[in-house]
Image (cartoon, coloured by chain):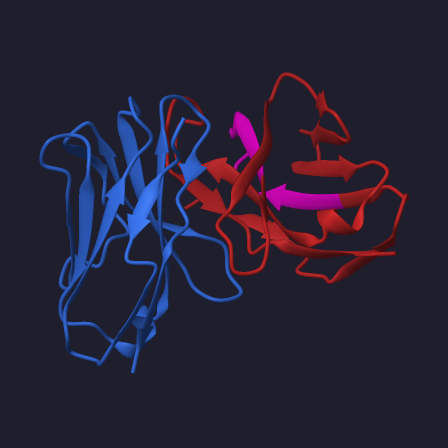
Chain colours: A blue, B red
Amino acid sequence: EAGVAQSPRYKIIEKRQSVAFWCNPISGHATLYWYQQILGQGPKLLIQFQNNGVVDDSQLPKDRFSAERLKGVDSTLKIQPAKLEDSAVYLCASSSGPEQYFGPGTRLTVT
Amino acid sequence: QKEVEQNSGPLSVPEGAIASLNCTYSDRGSQSFFWYRQYSGKSPELIMFIYSNGDKEDGRFTAQLNKASQYVSLLIRDSQPSDSATYLCAVPMYSGGGADGLTFGKGTHLIIQP
């Protein structure tokens, strides 16, 4: 069974630019999560989808971050405009129950 | 907001010994607890999870819950150098069941010395 796929794996942008990340969950997993992991910290939930609906986006900085999962499968996370403090690894995870399985992540560096 | 606290370490354990990792949680109502392993530069990998009704053993790993003191432990028996990693403890953000997003601790860095 294929795992969670993410792209790109690395991205370097300048502050105030925009960036988008893509995630394809494990086949059949209805729940998809985006987490942000800053160096030295645990992952922090940004947004959770159940199929194509948002379950929780309480920790998503909505002035600059947006996410969608239009067809209930793939998802994209966008940052516009980026700030220096957005430098982190962005992890996508999916689940069909309590266990969450993470993709390889996208390492974002904002200069 | 639920909180999870872990000693960041590093925790150094000789090869073959038992490694004991702890985390404390703030919400007495938490119903499930997760342990993830994260190698440097990699994404978190689920090791095991337990519900509040009992401990769990899986191979060399045992997760134990102390509800009275609000901490959960991960024991690794016969520690191997390949166990060297950061171990993240997590609890569901809300009801503790189903597929809630997780609140993670900062992780404990474990080093197994050959």
Single out the residue that lies furthest toward the front.
Answer: A1
Q: Residue B19's quadrant in the figure?
A: top right
- Residue at position x 34%, y 71% in the image: A87
Vertical comparison of B82 with B12: above or below: above
> What percent of the width, then of the height, locates residue A25?
30, 35
Vertical comparison of B10 with B85: above or below: below
Observer-nearest of B33 and A1? A1
Q: In the rendered structure, does residue A9 fall within the stretch colored magenta?
A: no
- Magenta region, main secondary structure: strand
Vertical comparison of A42 with B75: above or below: below
Q: In the rendered structure, does residue B30 fall within the stretch colored magenta?
A: yes
> What percent of the width, then of the height, locates residue A16?
15, 78
Tell me, yes or no, if residue B26 can be seen here: no
- Residue at position x 19%, y 42% in the image: A75
- Residue at position x 19%, y 27% in the image: A51
- Residue at position x 77%, y 37% in the image: B75
Left or right: residue B23 versus residue A85 is: right
Single out the residue that lies furthest toward the top.
Answer: B53
> What percent of the width, then of the height, locates residue A96?
36, 22
Tell me, yes or no, if residue A24 can be seen here: yes
Observer-nearest of B55 and A36? A36
Total numbered badges shown on the rendered structure = 0
Observer-nearest of B1 and A52? A52
Left or right: residue A104 versus residue A22 is: right
Quadrant where the image shows the C terminus of chain B: bottom right
Region in magenta: B21-35
Q: Residue A89's quadrant in the figure?
A: bottom left
> What percent of the width, then of the height, locates residue A91?
37, 50
